[in-house]
Amino acid sequence: MAVQGIWSGTISFSLVAIPVRLVTAVKPGRVSFHLLHSKDYSRLSRRMFCPEEGTMVTPDEIIRGYEVMPDKYVLMTDEELESVSPERSRTIEILEFIDVKEVDPIYYDHPYYLVPSKGGEKAYQLLVEVMRRTNKAGLAKFVLAEREYLVAVKSREGALELVTLHYSDEILPDEDISPKKEKIEVEEENRIKKSIQKMIEDFDPGKYADERRKKLMDILATKAKGKALVEAPAIEAEEGEGPADLVAALEESMRKVKESR
Amino acid sequence: MNRTFVDMAGGRLSLSNLEKDLYPSYGFTKAQILEYYRGIAPFILPHLKDRALTLKRYPEGVEKDFFFEKRCPGHRPAWVKTAEVPQHDGEPMTFCLVNDLETLIWVENLASLELHVPLARAGSPETPDSMVFDLDPGDPANILDCSRVALILRDLLSGMGLASYVKTSGQKGLHVFVALNRKETTFDDTKTFSKAVAEIMQKHYPDLVTSKMAKQERKAKVFINWSQNDASKTMICVYSLRAREKPFISFPLEWKELKNLAGLGDPEKLQVTHSEAVRRAEEKGDLFREVLVKEQKLPHL
């Protein structure tokens, strides 16, 4: 079965429009756990708590505040938030083509693949091939899940890759990081060069794996096989009567029901 | 894949695999399913409106695997209305709201034969607008036993000053609804009340009724499932198709109709098929309308 897309539409520039689907390109290897109650294994749920009143707060009493200074907030309503959200759009409009090498990797955020939809295969292939030969990437604006992203569309192993990019103001300045320039001795430079030279390899990410994840998955697989499973209870409420008034009224009503039958 | 395009008020819809038979042992194609929902739309839409829909999709038909989909698919058309509803973990999730015919047809094109919705609207997920008694027969009890229980339940509730309404589940059971429509009512209220009712029923009809979830308690009895009165639970929407061997509908009945049909002693007589459903709804109007509008306060809480 074809991979389910998270978005579908067209990628376009000048007179070209190619129908595509967006699918995710990476699956983070994080192992996630549910939080259970140690006594009965039921799934715990999160509630919002008001420390002032010492009570749980229901969703209709929750609003958003932006902290301008300690304990001072500007309130923001759903409508106000909505008013600045971009319109959802069905196109990835390429604004310009840039040299792939020009993009500093620090800008790369999240990678996706673009899959050609029916009827778009040929134009898709053509774009992949031309971008590969010219080493160009398309720069586009793209609305996904109520946010507008700056994205780069690149050719990658016969397919199109879409990478969301950070906006330039999200990149933190690095001026405090690099130390003051000092004079470098030739001897020292050569020594470092030699050390590096000795360690040079081709980049092969397959050599490395998340060891913690691997060990964790092994433990989980063994435990699941050994049937070390615990089960959440069906919500079986404790025995016990309802409010006395209610029970008395129900008994009275029941008496009449039985009489009339 | 075979595609057919239809232009609707909301936008253009591409419908796929219309000829596919999704109820193979009965013979009911996707085109017929869409036709059913188009016909029943005026009746079902008010009951779906503004409720966070859980899709139950049967892409390969009712005899093959299905999957629940709570999150409104990301590939939805731009005109599909959605709502953010906080989940168990406190994180909001985007749900589809089936507020118009276009969305209903789009959802059915995804082969979501069954439409499940909560007892509360998306804007006030902690406020149930009705209370439900889900009557579920344990073998060999059947829908006729459920009818007996439902009729007693109606009288018991009526003695408490509460009007109730009944529909078939479209499977083996019946659902009895009590309209509330008051913003002061909480799920804690409906749970406390319905549990007390179920326990009284069990106390007075121990051979017929159980209020216990455990499987072994339910054998040959009607389980009054009061625990459906919960913000995290959904019920099959009235007028929804069910994904059984035959395309039965979860359909509302008048109380006297239930009594008469149950009196015939044939469980099948209580089931309503797709073709009957549209005709009967058009003839009698929406028998579940009061569930949406009638205000009732639960006494003695």
Image: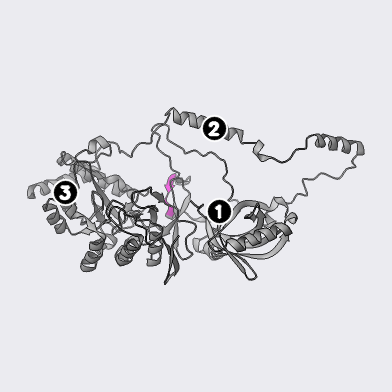
The disc at residue A23 is 1
Q: Is residue A58 magenta?
A: yes
Question: Label 1 is found on which chain of the structure?
Answer: A
Q: What is the distance, in whole Å, between disc 1 and disc 3 at their CAs?
A: 50 Å
Q: Amino acid at mark 1?
A: Val
Q: Position of residue B4 (x, y in %)?
A: 43, 66
- A187 lies left or right of B279: right
Up-down relation of residue A111 to residue B102 (above or below)? above
State left or right for residue A116 relative to residue B58.
Answer: right
Question: Mark 2 falls on what kind of element?
Answer: helix
- Specify start and end residues of the magenta stretch as a single range: A54-59
Say if labels 1 and 3 share a chain. no
Q: Residue at x 70, y 57 (%)?
A: A132
Q: Which residue position is annotated with label 2? A: A216
Between A106 and B141, the one lying in front of the other is: B141
Residue under mark 3: which chain is it in?
B
Between A156 and B86, which is closer to the camera in this rendering?
A: A156
* Disc 1 element: strand
What amino acid is labelled 2 in the image? Leu
Residue pointed to by mark 3: B144
Q: Circle 3 sits in a helix, a strand or a loop, which is it?
A: helix
Which residue is situated farthest in the top direction here?
A226
* A196 drawn magenta: no
Of A260 and A188, the residue lying toward us: A188
Residue A241 in the image: state x and y as whole percent: 24, 39
